[in-house]
């Protein structure tokens, strides 16, 4: 094979597959083929034209890849030598090591995070996104070899939701015997439930879809609160207080993407609570909050976007150790060939499938 194809978004909800010569990797870089790539919720925002910075370009950020060729001797970010045939997962963003934020030790805020992703596919090395036959991994992108005991479906999602929640729950320092309320049982919420469970926390998951709450229990939720049963904020607050000896939760995690959930989170927390907000990622929406309530409880608010790239290594370690205890492999419920990337995006957007994967034809 000397050419490959990559998905190009040329305007809102309009994609085409473009074909290019396969690049020979530069020193330290890796050319990989895509084993499977997932259609993530944030991809749909880009596809619809809602992303604040990206309006055209390649698509795809979650993937499991197989090394085709390395530029010289290349090691993964944990020091393992990489050879053709090795399965790897790359962080979907670059950490340039040269900007102010990288210099401050905050690679998750790298000013050049999307320097490859945002390029036109016409620009070498063309394969800037994972919705393609191939993906080009640069030497300033963290990437890790996948342990052989990690399920391929789970590995393909590791560089997004699982790394994100490992980072976020680390930032709020969730510890043993704490109670955590997880607002939303989508991909981030389910991953957060499993991680919080393994950290020894007691988990309460809030969502309005019975099937998603069933799934949350499979991912370790100790308690679930159904929005259709507890219809008001007051009712949900009372329920959380009942479950926490009247104290409120120690930690709340917002992974709904719904602005109104923020004020509710403050109400579900107890005194000295920590609030991790990472589901509301689209600027321009507004929510009403009661700041006095938050201050009187001394709530600490943490927001996170992206993750320290070594969290991806933690994610693979988590899957190696605990992956079999949760149905990570069932989170993807539909597979599409790359040639039907349009169908995969449309069915995902219409919620006909929960999580679609593009698989090698
Ligand atoms: Zn994602
Ligand atoms: Zn940087």
Image: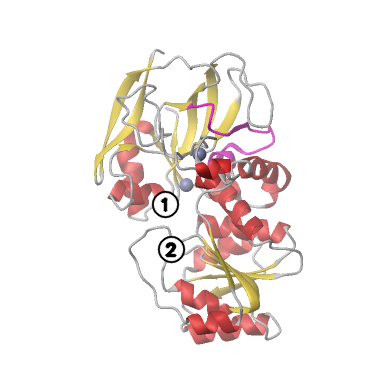
Q: CA distance from mark 2 to mark 1?
A: 10 Å
Color theme of the render = secondary structure
Ligand 1 has an atom within 8 Å of the beta carbon of the residue at disc 1: yes
| Image location of residue 142, percent across then percent down | 57, 34
Quarter containing the N terminus: top left
Q: Is 161 left, or right, of 125 in this rendering?
A: right
Q: Position of residue 271 (x, y in %)?
A: 65, 80
For numbered disc 1, what is the local secondary structure? helix
Earlier-in-chain disc, 2 versus 1: 1
Q: Residue at x 57, y 58 (%)?
A: 190
User: Is the Cβ of the residue at disc 2 closer than 8 Å to that at disc 1?
Assistant: yes
Q: Position of residue 334 (x, y in %)?
A: 44, 44
Q: Is residue 131 magenta?
A: no
For disc 2, the marked residue is: 257
SS state under label 2: loop
- Residue 355 lies, in percent from the top left, at 45, 49
**Segment tinted magenta in the rendering:** 137-158
């Amino acid at each position: 094979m000397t050419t490959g194809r990559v998905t190009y978004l040329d305007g809102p909800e309009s994609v085409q597959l473009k074909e290019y010569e396969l690049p020979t990797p530069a020193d330290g870089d890796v050319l990989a083929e895509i084993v499977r790539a997932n259609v993530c919720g944030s991809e749909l925002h880009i596809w619809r034209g809602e992303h604040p910075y990206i309006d055209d370009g390649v698509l795809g950020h979650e993937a499991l890849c197989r090394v085709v060729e390395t530029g010289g001797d290349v090691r993964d970010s944990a020091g393992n030598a990489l050879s053709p045939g090795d399965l790897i997962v790359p962080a979907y963003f670059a950490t340039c090591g040269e900007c102010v934020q990288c210099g401050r030790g905050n690679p998750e805020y790298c000013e050049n995070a999307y320097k490859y992703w945002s390029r036109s596919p016409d620009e070498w090395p063309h394969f800037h996104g994972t919705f393609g036959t191939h993906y080009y991994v640069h030497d300033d992108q963290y990437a890790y070899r996948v342990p052989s005991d990690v399920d391929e479906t789970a590995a393909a999602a590791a560089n997004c939701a699982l790394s994100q929640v490992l980072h976020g729950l680390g930032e709020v320092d969730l510890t043993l015997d704490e109670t955590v309320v997880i607002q939303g049982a989508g991909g981030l919420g389910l991953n957060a439930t499993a991680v919080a469970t393994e950290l020894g926390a007691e988990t309460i998951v809030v969502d309005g879809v019975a099937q998603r709450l069933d799934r949350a229990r499979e991912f370790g939720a100790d308690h679930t609160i159904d929005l259709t049963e507890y219809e008001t904020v007051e009712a949900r607050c009372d329920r959380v207080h009942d479950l926490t000896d009247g104290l409120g939760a120690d930690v709340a995690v917002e992974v709904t993407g719904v602005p109104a959930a923020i004020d509710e989170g403050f109400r579900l927390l107890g005194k000295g609570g920590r609030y991790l907000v990472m589901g509301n990622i689209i600027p321009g929406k507004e929510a009403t909050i009661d700041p006095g309530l938050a201050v009187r409880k001394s709530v600490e608010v943490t927001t996170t976007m992206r993750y320290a790239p070594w969290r991806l290594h933690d994610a693979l370690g988590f899957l190696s150790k605990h992956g079999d205890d949760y149905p990570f492999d069932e989170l993807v419920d539909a597979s599409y060939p790359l040639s039907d990337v349009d169908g995969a995006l449309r069915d995902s957007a219409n919620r006909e499938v929960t999580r679609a994967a593009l698989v090698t034809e």
